Image: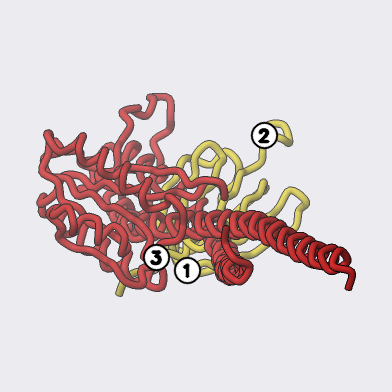
Chain colours: A red, B yellow
């Protein structure tokens, strides 16, 4: 049976941990609100972009822009986006597990290159000795604009030169606070779903001509889509951390109440024992006739 | 002219940072590369680049609203107008 002093120390230590998790939850909540607002405000653009690009290429009836050109997928670049920091529940481990399944599936049909984003993914693929060309591991959340610009140039270059045939991105998409949705989506080529434009549709006017207009639009494609993935992942990360810290705080509370109960029981038992001893002593003295 | 309900345009203006306008409107003017383009219900399908200027639209209540835009592009199809604007070039 633990002594009272041990129990008191233990309770104090759990209480300290609880304060830490509580504080982290507050921080995560504030960050989540910001990230969430950003994601919700930007989604209309992100979602309309591929749709518009595909529509334009479909109605243009021209040779497709290189981004829309579907080649046999021989060399694939897979971007895996995790967070830099831990303490966010199964956020990273679930994503990495999904990424590994994806890589296993593609392994036999194509040459793979992995591009980890975030410290957790970088460490994971380093350990597994995967061919990694480029990775971003520090302060991803602070440099979303910079990273997406840099990466879009890099990927565009490689795709144009046919060094890679397709780019996939595996990331946590923010769905709800409860759990993020792990999403694997193809960034390039932009898949043209085979529906041809029907004949009764009027041919649209173009100003300037179709090729130039599509070039103009697609110049922005990679950069804003990359930004999309990074920001979605961040919103999901903060939501996961918020949930994880809330659970930790709750668990600490339960543990404290269990320990306090035990403490009280032990304390009462010792009081009863002492009383009993005193009483016995009094009885003994009485019998001796003192 | 067709019925009142039919002679409306769905206008959606999006920029990378947010959805700027989503409204039912009667008329839109967008700054094209060679001057303003007026778009009324029943317009031919059009895809055009936009210049810098003000996008002006008249709401179903007859109020005129303005949004300043800095380039982008517009798609008109089936009385639905989608405007993309505010994309920044790298350089």
State the residue position of label 3: A85
Residue A186, x across and y down, in percent:
30, 43
Q: Quadrant of residue A204?
A: top left
Which residue does the image show at 31% across and 44% down from the upper left? A97
- SS for tag 2? loop
Q: Nearer the viewer, residue A226 or A64?
A: A226
Give neighbour class at mark 1: few <14, some 14-19, many 20+ (Cα, 10 Å).
Answer: some
Image check: B74 left or right of A129?
A: right
The residue most toward the top is A199
Circle 1 marks a residue in which chain? B
Circle 2 marks a residue in which chain? B
Viewer can see residue A50: yes
How far is disc 3 from disc 1 in space, using C-alphas?
A: 38 Å
Quadrant showing the N terminus of chain B: top right
Residue A101, x across and y down, in percent:
26, 38
Q: Is residue A219 above or below residue A8?
A: above
Circle 3 marks a residue in which chain? A
Give neighbour class at mark 3: few <14, some 14-19, many 20+ (Cα, 10 Å).
Answer: some
Which residue does the image show at 32% across and 47% down from the upper left? A170
Q: Are marks 3 and 2 on the same chain?
A: no
Q: Earlier in the sequence, mark 1 or mark 2?
A: 2
Marking on residue B70: 1
């Amino acid at each position: 049976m633990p002594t009272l002093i041990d129990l008191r120390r233990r309770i104090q230590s759990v209480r300290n941990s609880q304060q830490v998790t509580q504080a982290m939850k507050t921080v995560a909540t504030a960050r989540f609100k910001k990230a969430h607002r950003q994601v919700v405000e930007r989604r209309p653009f992100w979602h309309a972009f591929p749709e518009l690009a595909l529509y334009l290429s479909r109605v243009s009836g021209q040779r497709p822009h290189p981004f829309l050109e579907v080649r046999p997928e021989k060399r694939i670049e897979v971007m895996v986006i995790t967070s830099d920091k831990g303490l966010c529940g199964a956020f990273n481990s679930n994503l990495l597990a999904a990424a590994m399944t994806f890589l296993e599936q593609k392994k036999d049909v194509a040459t793979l290159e992995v591009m980890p984003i975030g410290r957790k993914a970088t460490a994971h693929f380093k350990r597994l000795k995967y061919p990694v060309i480029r990775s971003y591991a520090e302060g991803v959340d602070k440099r979303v604009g910079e990273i997406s610009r840099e990466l879009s140039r890099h990927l565009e270059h490689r795709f144009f030169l046919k060094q890679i045939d397709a780019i996939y991105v595996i990331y946590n998409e923010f769905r709800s606070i409860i759990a993020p949705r792990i999403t694997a989506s193809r960034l390039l080529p932009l898949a043209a779903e085979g529906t041809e434009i029907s004949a009764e549709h009027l041919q649209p006017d173009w100003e300037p001509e179709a090729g130039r207009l599509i070039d103009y639009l697609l110049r922005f494609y990679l950069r804003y889509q990359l930004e999309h993935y990074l920001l979605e992942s961040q919103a999901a990360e903060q939501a996961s951390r918020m949930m994880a810290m809330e659970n930790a705080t709750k668990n600490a509370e339960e543990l404290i109440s269990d320990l306090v109960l035990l403490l009280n029981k032990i304390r009462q038992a010792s009081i009863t024992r002492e009383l009993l001893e005193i009483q016995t002593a009094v009885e003994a003295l009485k019998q001796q006739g003192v | 002219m067709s019925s009142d309900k039919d002679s409306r345009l769905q206008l959606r203006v999006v920029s990378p940072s947010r959805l700027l306008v989503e409204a039912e409107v009667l008329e839109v003017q967008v700054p094209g590369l060679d001057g303003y383009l007026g778009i009324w219900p029943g317009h031919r399908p059009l895809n055009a680049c936009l210049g810098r200027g003000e996008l002006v639209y008249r709401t179903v209540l007859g109020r005129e609203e303005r949004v300043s835009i800095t380039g982008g592009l517009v798609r008109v199809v089936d009385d639905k107008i989608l405007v993309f604007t505010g994309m920044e070039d790298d350089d």
